Amino acid sequence: MKYKIPVVFALCAFFVTPAFAQYSPTITVNCALGQSLNATLSRLSKQVPFTVLVQGTCTEYITINGFDGLTLKGAPGAALQQPATTPSNGLGIWVLSIRASQSVTVDGLAIHSGASALGGIGIGQNSADVRLRNLTIDGPAIFGIEIFEGSQVSLAGVTTRDAGFATLAALDLSDVHIEQSLFEETTGGGFHEGIVASSGHVTVQSTTIRDMQVGIGISAHGSVDIQSFNTYFPVVRPNDVVIANPAGTNFQGVQLTRGTLGVGDTKLRITNAGQPFGGSSGAISASEDSTVSDGNGNLIITGSQGQGLFVSNNSHASLGGSSITGGNHGGLVVTNLSSVSLLSNGFQTLFGGNATDVFCDSRSLITGGARFAGVPITNCGNVLAGDTEPLP
């Protein structure tokens, strides 16, 4: 007797597939009981959207490689701790490594690294839609979070402190969105940067960077946008980005070397930046063909110990309604074949209360001088009232 089993199986597969598509199991790993998070991950199907609930402190190097739809959720008090030994295979250079993965969420964990780690979290190999949520990351590793090799990551509610060098680095054309986060240095020693964008792109809102020698470093054609975006947390105004330096250890609030800074619909506030010796230290230093733009009056610089906005070496700034006040040296300093445009956008740009509000050398140019607010103290022979010389 012949049975038509293949037809029955085909019909069952047709009707059951949608149910399996919604299947999202939760697995608990309790490291306090000696269970291993890595061992659990190694047994999971990488194509099923598992949620792994982490309890206790997991003292191991965690690797997430090739997953699609994984969630690591920390129970209250859960942590990842760097082991005392560094593995010889080179795979443990981050406490948590995410590679070649997509739609991965890491939520509610503390991550502690040591000096032998490259970073607390490393995300690379074109990982996409990686979501870091409600994390605390600390330790003397070189980076708190390192994002590289064209990866796409968003941070919300992340506190990163006391990294050996930078609390966050966006490298290799990676794209990063940051909201309601804190990057700070509390040790008082060494040289530290808050955000490094070296050929990467970072969009930031509602975030504070505190007591870094460089608040934001942009280089190698990297870019940073101060801009609101679709958020994980509800939008609460103001959602300013603040670079604060209460310890007085800062050299540059933002340092650009062949980089781009765009201040969009969100305020960038830089306070107490730079050092009393002046030079290129200050709130923003743009050099080597860099660009700074603020077309919405959202760049606010106050009380710089060094310069306010220093534009040099064939760089350019476009300002419309910006405010740079109360600095110990120059408010706006333009040198070495550089230029600044004061925009005709209906806003006047305020320079006031600085030792010299506006300075330029003989090879640099400021246009739109009629749009200065107030009566700035000016030492610049190349200021045009309008946008250009008179046109034919």
Image (tube, helix red, strand yellow):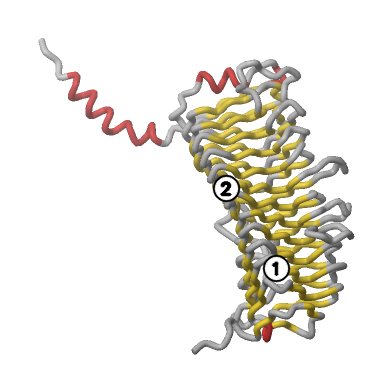
Q: Position of residue 174 (x, y in %)?
A: 54, 45
Q: In the image shown, does 137 or 303 lie closer to the viewer?
A: 303
Element assignment for label 1: strand
Badge 1 or badge 2: first in the primary sequence: 2
Q: Quadrant of the N terminus?
A: top left
CA distance separating discs 1 and 2: 23 Å
- Residue at 50% over, 41% down: 128
Sort mark 2 into few (<14), some (14-19) or many (20+) by Cα contacts within 10 Å.
Answer: many
Which label is found at residue 369? none
Q: In the image shown, does 326 or 102 lie closer to the viewer?
A: 326
Q: In the image shown, does 224 or 209 lie closer to the viewer?
A: 224
User: Which corner quadrant of the image does residue 164 belong to?
Assistant: top right
Which residue is disc 2 drawn over? 199
- Residue at 69% over, 40% down: 135
Looking at this rendering, what residue extends furthest in the front direction? 362
Q: Position of residue 199 (x, y in %)?
A: 57, 48
| Three-letter residue code for mark 2 | Ser
Q: Is 96 on the left-hand or right-hand side of 182?
A: left
- Residue at 81% over, 54% down: 251
Is residue 198 positioned above or below 138 on the image? below
Q: Position of residue 281 (x, y in %)?
A: 80, 58
User: Which corner quadrant of the image does residue 110 belong to?
Assistant: top right
User: Which corner quadrant of the image does residue 360 belong to?
Assistant: bottom right
Q: Position of residue 6 (x, y in %)?
A: 19, 21
| Three-letter residue code for mark 1 | Leu
Which residue is disc 1 drawn over? 299
Element assignment for label 2: loop
